[in-house]
Structure formats: structure tokens, C-alpha cells
Amino acid sequence: MTSTTLTPLTSNQTSDPTPIQRTFSAQLDTSIRLRQSTTAERLTKIKKLKQAVLAHSEDIIAAGFADFGKPATEVELTEILPIVAEANDAIRKLSGWMKPKKVWPSRMMFGTFGYTQYEPKGRVLIISPWNYPVNLTLGPLVSAIAAGNTVIIKTSEMTPHLSTVIGTIIRETFDETEIALFEGDATVAQALLELPFDHIFFTGSPAVGKVVMTAAAKNLTSVTLELGGKSPTIIDESADLELAAKNTLWAKFTNNGQTCIAPDHVYVHASVKDAFIKHCVDALDSIYGKDAQKIESPDLARIVNTRHVARVKGLLDDATSRGARVITGGQYDESKRFIAPTLLDDIPDNAEIMREEIFGPLLPIISFTQLDNVIARINADPKPLALYVWSRNKENIKKVMQQTTSGGACINHSVVQFLHGNLPFGGVNNSGIGSGHGHFGFMAFSHERGVVRSWIILAKMFYPPYTSFTRKLIAIFIKTV
């Protein structure tokens, strides 16, 4: 397949409701037809999508560099590999997911048998973010196709080169009456949100998630919201400090910190804090070079645009103006969309960086002496999308897992919960609603229909006219069900 020209598409970049409404209307008949789609038909589409992604892999790598300065390896690891894994999981398991599931009758349902039937929700909308555009657009798309839906996709205008490649893949692979894509700014998303979709899958910030949920409520549309928040890491005195440092830095500075499940800040036990910081500084210098060398590192992505450079730099300036100390990093070059990987210490509680999701290469390190105090701080904040614990103390691990909540968690690892296809991925309250990936993604885009089939109709005993015998029967049921 020939390479895609890496210039932003101009087609469909409009908030004019006419083409949007036309496409939405055109998908109605298709969505009804797809209720009867077979496993084989759905798998054919998933396989075509996977092959299209692989055929355009070099285009995706080039676009990732154009939009973010992303290393090719990072694009393959975080954009292409998860889509292939998601598609292969569906290819292997979709037949089982689609089968009706028999259920035993309850005591009141003697004389019947029941089953759950999985139906497509219908016409669905996927609104994807800018930080991992391919992964977080096409991953949900695999699930939507597996469940038998039609789809309209809205990609982010902030990564035009990657959006171009995604648009090319969609338009080469699918008819727009089944899967269509619109590009453009927030006005396009607003126009789409006016429509009565059967489900909306949104990935983005909690603030915009509230806008999406408000719009969905007007049409009683169900939603899956994959949001974010300030995901903490806890490192106690028993942890393998060198491993914790290298793994946490990898998770934090992949995509230059622009990851919804990246460690937002680290709580480290005071007795091992200095040792942990030394491991971090040594690792950063080894991976990205010392100080000024970091700006030339081929392994460090860039901030998505200058507006976000200014936002992240503002968090850094606010923290230091209030007394925070830069351990390492702090260098920046707005023209190159560069902020160095930065470790911070002595951060006051009133600093903006302790309230706002960082989504950039700044890592506050906070010492503690009592684990209970850390748990209390985590519970005082909105529920995070992820939580990471580094410990070899089983009681400490148990305490954190029992006394906190988060969308997902890792023990002695970071961010890999996203790649575990057999686990639900999603947030809780402020960090999200609903789950995706694998079977959980299939269920997000499916209606689980309960069906009862009778072979003896015992309910006729309760038909009117009501008698004293009827009431005696009900009394027996009340005691025995």
C-alpha cells in the first residue's frame, strides 16, 4: 500500500450539520441490518482493520514523529501493538462472546428457562483524544465492530498528521454507511453530540467528560467515559528501589508524560527517599543524557503543542515560586515544544501541580513516614484512574488495596494494566465510567438482553379475580422464594 501524504485532511473538517446528519441517518438502516450480522462477518471487518493498520505502520510512525517527535519504537509499542493485540483477542474469542448464555431459573421462575442475548447497541460515537490517537481510536473501534455496531469517529484536531492516517485507514477499509470519520475542532464534536446516538465512547479529560455526559443525557444515551486524574505511586521502605525508579520513570516519561495512566506523583518513604531519588537521577541521565543533552535525545517525545508547553511550564513555575525544589530537569524550549524530564521535591500542598493533572514531564516526589497518611491523602482527592504500589510488604500492599479505590492498579509495576486484555480498563467516578478492552469492550458496545421462555405458565394462578386462595399462594411464595 502506498504511503499516505502527511498533510491534514480538509474534507469533513466542518461543523456544518448537513454531512454529519446525512451520515448519521444513512447509518440507521445499516445498524438495523447489523443486528443479524454473524461472527464471520464481524471478524472479516476486524481482520481488514488490523491489516490496514499494519499496511500503514510506516505512515503511523512518520505521523507520530510529525505530531509529537515520537521515537519509532514508542509508536510501535504504544500505538500499533495495542491495536494488533486488541484485534487478535477479538478474533480468537468473539464467537464465545456472541453466544447467548443460559441461566438457571430462580425459584419464582419454575417452568421457564432463561438466557442473555448480546445485541448491538446500534449507532455509536467514538470521540478519541490526541495523546495516543491511533490506539485510543481504533481500540474502541475493534470493540464496536465486534459488538455489531455502526460507528462515527471524531478524532482530535491537535494531532493532524495522525488523524490523517487514521482517516485514510477508515476510508480505505469501510463504507461510511457503516463506519465514518469526521475531523475538525470542538464545533464538530458539539454537532455530533446533538445527535441521538445509542452509545458514546469518549476518552479525554474529566472536564470534557462532563460535557459529553450532559449532552448524552439529553438523548438518554449510554456512555463509556475513559478519563484521567492524578494517579499516585506509593513506594515504601521495603521496595526494590532501583526497579521502582526505572519502571516509574519509563511509565512517566513515555510520550513525555502525556499519558492518562502515567504516575502523576510519587509518595516515597522518608527512609529511602534519597536513595530512590539517586536511582531516578542516574536513570534519567543514562537514558536521555545529562541536562542540555536531553533536548537532543531521540528517545524523548515532545509536548503536543506550544499551548501545552505553556500550561506545563506554568505548573512548574507556580510550584517553584511557592518553594518547590527542582532536583533535576527544568530546562525548556517552547519553540521546540520541549520540557526536560523534571523531578520536584518540597512541593507545598497549595501548589497548582498538586491539584491539576500534570499530563507532562514533571514528577513531584513526596516523602512520608506513615502509610495511613498517604492513604488519607489519596482518599481525600477524586478517585484516580490508576494507582501503583511498590512494596515487598504483604500487609502494606493489602492495606493500600483495601483502603483506596482507583480505576485500575499495579503492584510492583506501572501502566501495564492497560495492556492486560483479560482485565477491564476504565476509571471510577471522576476518572471514568464503564470499561473497555477485550470482552469488557464488547460488552460496553452491546445490550445484554434478558430473555425468558416458558414451557409451563404458573403465573395463571395469580390471574384475577383474586381469591383468598390466591393470597395464600402468595404468602407461601413470600416465605419460600
Image (tube, rainbow, N blue to C red):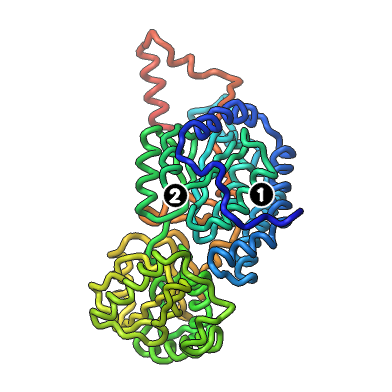
Assess disc 2: are there few (<14), some (14-19) or many (≥20) residues with their C-alpha within 10 Å of its C-alpha.
many
User: Residue 452 is drawn in which quadrant?
Assistant: top right
Image quarter of the C terminus: top left
Kind of residue at disc 2: Leu
Task: Give the farthest residue toward the top.
Answer: 465
In the rendered view, tell whether residue 65 sits above or below residue 153: below
The residue at the point 38 percent across, 68 percent down is 358
User: Residue 311 is drawn in which quadrant?
Assistant: bottom left
Q: Measuring from the top left, give residue 54's x and y in whole percent.
A: 72, 57
The residue at the point 49 percent across, 46 percent down is 201
Assess disc 1: are there few (<14), some (14-19) or many (≥20) residues with their C-alpha within 10 Å of its C-alpha.
many
Q: Is residue 406 visible?
A: no
Q: Measuring from the top left, give residue 424's x and y in whole percent.
A: 53, 55
Q: Measuring from the top left, give residue 388's x and y in whole percent.
A: 45, 71
In the rendered view, tell whether residue 78 sits above or below residue 22: below
The residue at the point 55 percent across, 67 percent down is 416
Task: Identify the mark at residue 258; answer none if there is no mark.
Answer: none
Task: Give how far apart the Cα atoms at labels 1 and 2 are.
Answer: 25 Å
Earlier residue among tags 1 and 2: 1
Taking the image as shown, residue 376 lies to the left or right of residue 302, namely left
In the rendered view, tell whether residue 124 sits above or below residue 421: above
Taking the image as shown, residue 265 lies to the left or right of residue 90, namely left
Kind of residue at disc 1: Ile
What residue is pinned by disc 2? 225
Dot 2 falls on a residue whose secondary structure is strand
In the rendered view, tell whether residue 477 sits above or below residue 47: above
Residue in the foreground of this view, choosing between 15 and 246: 15
Dot 1 falls on a residue whose secondary structure is helix
The residue at the point 46 percent across, 75 percent down is 338
What residue is pinned by disc 1? 169
